Image (spheres, rainbow, N blue to C red):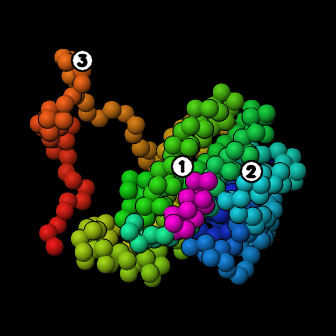
Amino acid sequence: MNLEGKVGIVTGAGRGIGREVARLLANEGASVVVNDPGVGRSGEAEGGHPADDVVDEIKSTGGMAVANTSSVTEYEAAGLMVLQCTETFGKIDFVVNVAGMLRERMIWNMSEDDFDSVINVHLKGHWNMCHHAIKPMRAARFGRIVNFSSDAFKGSIGQCNYAAAKAGIIGLTRSIARECGRYGITANAICPMAATRMTVNDAVIAGWKRRLESGLLTQAEYDGRMAMPGPEFVPPIVAYLCTDAAAEVNGQLFHAEKSRIHTYYFGEVSRSMHKYDDGGMFTVDELIETVPGSLMAGIPNVAPAHES
């Protein structure tokens, strides 16, 4: 077992990808705090106790786990979750931040609460957990942070709140990696592709069909979404990043779906142009003349205007 003796927290672990992650980490020998407040896809209250259910599953196979039903949006609750982990199991080695929600609207229809709620769960929630967990990790000079981002960081129609949060998580993760690597703490991010109640339901499929019909999705994009694999393919890369073997993997972004895992090459200069006379300052007229044939040559508009 690759995580024998390790201890940590998985947020959003009552269902979907989080559940599969918690189960695999436990199967690999880790003791797990299973966090899930038991809310719906949009953050609405739901019945049931999914965290307790996952703990029962883990214990039924000989693993060690305890439940936590706090919201990651609450700063003090996040701190108490970390305290629960250290008091119950004696330490904290990893945090896997999966907790999330969706409130999908086009930007002109999105309410302030839709935006704030999604940012609070994803970006603020990730920060809350990392902030509290890194303190004991830093003292122990060991830690693994695995944050869940999404390919939506590239920009996603009807999800500007979610896309902004997921892009922010990448920046947060790389900052943590740079700040904490010297203390034996790594931070990496995952962009999963998996069919869960968050990503695929009747309303979501209906929305995809509307976007396909309006030309906002290609047929290939639509077909790919309809063939989305299950969440069980995502946890192995997460478990790997929590092991001692991944000590030199830090500040990276991974995509995981079914039989494919890949990394992203980003943050580097793609094209540049320089001016060496007149103090190096471009005029607006010069940019109008030169940008189309240099920086933007061959690069299409991601969403060209259509005549009404």
Q: Is residue 119 magenta?
A: yes
Quick one: label 2 or label 1, which is nearer the N terminus?
2
Question: Is 307 above or below relative to 137?
Answer: below
**Where residue 12 appears, x then y in whole percent?**
65, 63
* Residue 226 in which image quadrant: bottom left
| Secondary-structure class at tag 1 | helix
Quick one: label 2 or label 3, which is nearer the N terminus?
2
* Residue 107 in which image quadrant: bottom left
User: Which amino acid type is marked by label 1?
Assistant: Ile
**Where residue 258 appears, x then y in whole percent?**
47, 60
**Is 129 placed left or right of 230 in the picture?**
right
Query: In front: mark 3 or mark 1?
Result: 3
State the residue position of label 1: 169
Residue appearing at x 54%, y 39% in the figure: 174
Q: Which mark is residue 279?
A: 3
Residue appearing at x 71%, y 69% in the figure: 37
Q: Which mark is residue 8?
A: 2
